[in-house]
Image (cartoon, coloured by chain):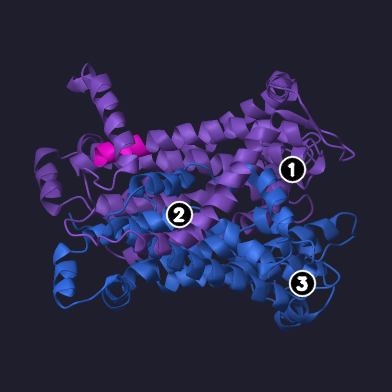
Chain colours: A blue, B purple
Amino acid sequence: MQRIKPFDHLILILGALFLIAPVVMAIMSSTQNAIDIHTNGLYITPGSNAVATYGKVLTHKGGFTGDVTGLRMLMNSMIMGIGFAVGKIVLSMMAAYALVYFRFRFATLLFWMIFTTLLLPLEVRIMPSYQVMSTLGLLNSYTGLIVPLLASATGTFFFRQFFRSVPDEMLEAARIDGAGPFKFFIDILVPLSRTMMAAIFIIMFIYGWNQYLWPLLMTTDESFYTLMRGIKSILQVWIGSQIPDYNEAFALAVLAMVPPVAVVVIFQRMFIKGLTESDK
Amino acid sequence: MTDTTIRPVAADRALLSRLRAWYSAETPNPAKRVQFNRPFTPWLFLLPQLAVVVIFFYWPSVQAVTSSFYIEDPFGFGATFVGMENYTDAVSSSQYAGTAFFTAFFCVVVTALSLGIGLLLAVKADKVIRGAATYKTLLISVYAIAPPVAGLIGMMFFDMHIGPLTDIAAFFGHDLRVGIDYWDTVFAVTIISVWKQIPYNFIFFLSGLQSVPVSVREAALIDAKSGWRRFMDVTLPLLAPTAFFLLVINITYAMFDTFPIFDVVVKDKPANNPITLVYKVYLDGFKGNDIGGSSAQSVILMVVVAALTVLQFRFLERRVHYG
C-alpha cells in the first residue's frame, strides 16, 4: 500500500502548479520594471527593481490615488482585520455565554433573532445598509468599516457549540466555590476557550482583511482606504495610460496577499481547525 | 426515508413547541443541565450583539423590503408607493432574465469545477505519504488571497499585452479578448473564481477524508481491491455530508463572493460583459440610482439565499443525528 504512485504525485504537482504559479509570477513580476513587463510579459525570475518599486508603493503619495500611501492602506487593512476579529470574538463569546449558561425569558426568541443573520450575506442588503450608515453619519470611519460586518452570527454559532461541549461539572464546581456569572466567565470559560479564540481569530482576521465591497462603499475619504480599496483605484488609473505600472500593481497585490497567506501558512493547523469547525 | 408519512405532523408539533419556547424560560432542551438563573445578567451579555444585529441587520433588511415597494424621486422629493411594480419591472425585463440565466450558469460551472478539482486533489493528497505536508501547504495557501487580488492577478494573466494565457490562446489560434468579448470574459472570470475556491473545497474534503476511521479504510481495502470501487462505494458515501455542505457554500460563493472578481475584470463597464445578479443590484442601486428596483432585486436574492441556507441547516441537523 505504501508504494510511491507517480500518477498521484503528477496530479498533485499539476494542482499545486495551477494554484501557486500565478502567485509566484505576481511576486516575481513585482520586482521587475514596467517597461520590461510590457515588452516581455510576466516573469518567473526575480528582477532588480524590488526595492524601488516597493519603496514607491509604500511611501509615495499619489502613486495611484493621489493622496494615500501604501503604508497607510496597509495600516488600515491591519486595523480592519484585527478590529473585526477582536470585535467578533468579544461580541460572540458574550452572546454565546448568555445563550448557553443562562435560563431566562425570551432566550429562544433571541437565539433565533441572532441566528437568522446567518441567512443573508451583507451583499444582498448592501444598498439599504449604506443608507443606514449615512443616516448614522458613520461613512468614512473605522466604526463604519468594522461594526456593520459584525452583524452576522458565525462566531456566536461557533462559540455556542464550543460552550455546549464544556462539561457541566465545570459550572457546578465553580458554583460550589461561590463563583458568580462574571467570575465564571472571566476566570474559567475565557481561559478554557483560548485555542478556540485563536482559531476564530485567524479566520476572522482573513475575512476582515479581505473585505472589498463594504470598504468600497463606505470610504470616499482616501485616508480610510484599505489595500483592497487601493486595488480598485489602481485599475481606474490604468484606463487610458500608455504603459500601465504593472510592477506597482503587482507590488500592491503582493502587499495585500502576504499577511493573510502568511497567517494561514504559519498557523496552518489552527486555521484548519477554525475553518472546518466554525463554518459548519 | 421511511418516515416521510409522519413528517408533517412531527413538523407541526415541532413548530408549536418552538413557538411556546419563544416566550418561556423553560426550554425543553436546555443547552446545559445547570444554568444560572438570573433575569438581567444574560441581557447584559447579549446587548452588544443584539444592538449590532438590530441596527445593521434588521433595520437595513426591513428597509430593503419597504423601499422595494416605492419608486424614489430622482431629485430626492420623496417616494411614491407603487406596490409590486418594481418586482414586475425587474422580473419582466429581458436584461434581468439574461443576468439571472448567466448567474445560474456561472454557479453551476464554478461549483462543479471547484468541487471536482478540490475533491480530486484531496483524494490524492490523502493517499500520498512523501511530501504530503508540502502539497497540503501549497494547496491551502491560496485560500487566504482576497477575491479582488485574485481578480487583479487573473486580469494580468488575461491581459491583451502581457498575459501569458492570451499568448497560449493565440497559439491555439484563438484571439482572447477579455473585457471585450462576452464569452472570453466569462471564461476568464470562471477560471479566476474556480482558482480562488479550490483550496476551500480541498481543505474540507481532506479533513473529511482524514476523519474516516482507519478500521473502515482497512476493511474497505480487504473488500475491494480496485481503488475506483473503494472510492465509489466507501469514500464517496462517507464524504456525502461534506460534499452537500460544500455544494451550498460554493453556490453562495459563486453568487456573492465573486463580486470583487467581476468588479475588477468588468471594471464598471457592463456594456457587453457578463455580470451576476448581485453585481446588477449594485449597479442599479449605486450607479443607476434606481433604489426601488435595486431593493426589489435584493429582496428576490434574499429569498433565494434564505432558501439555500435553510436547506443547508435542515441537512446539517440530520447529519448531527447520524454523526
| Pointer 2 or 1: first along the chain | 1
Comparing B247 with B135, the one in front is B247
Q: Is residue B190 above or below residue B260?
A: above
Q: Position of residue A66 (x, y in %)?
A: 86, 70
Q: Are marks 3 and 1 on the same chain?
A: no
Give the Cα distance between marks 2 and 1. Answer: 25 Å
Amino acid type indicated by mark 1? Val
Amino acid type indicated by mark 3? Ser
The magenta stretch spans which residues? B313-319
Give the Cα distance between marks 3 and 1. Answer: 33 Å
Residue B318 on the magenta span: yes
- At 13% from the left and 66% from the top, the residue drawn is A169
Q: Which mark is residue B250?
A: none
Residue B135: tell me if it is visible. no
Q: Left or right: where does residue A140 sit relative to residue A155?
A: right
Give the Cα distance between marks 2 and 3. Answer: 33 Å
Residue at the disc numbered 1: B178
Corner quadrant of residue A77: bottom right
Comparing B4 with A190, the one in front is A190
- At 70% from the left and 76% from the top, the residue drawn is A47
Residue B103 on the magenta span: no
Indicate the secondary structure of the residue bearing disc 3. helix
The mark lying in front, picked from 3 and 1, is 3
Q: Left or right: where does residue A62 sit relative to residue B1?
A: right
Residue at the disc numbered 3: A223
Q: Position of residue A234 (x, y in %)?
A: 78, 62
Residue at the disc numbered 2: B199
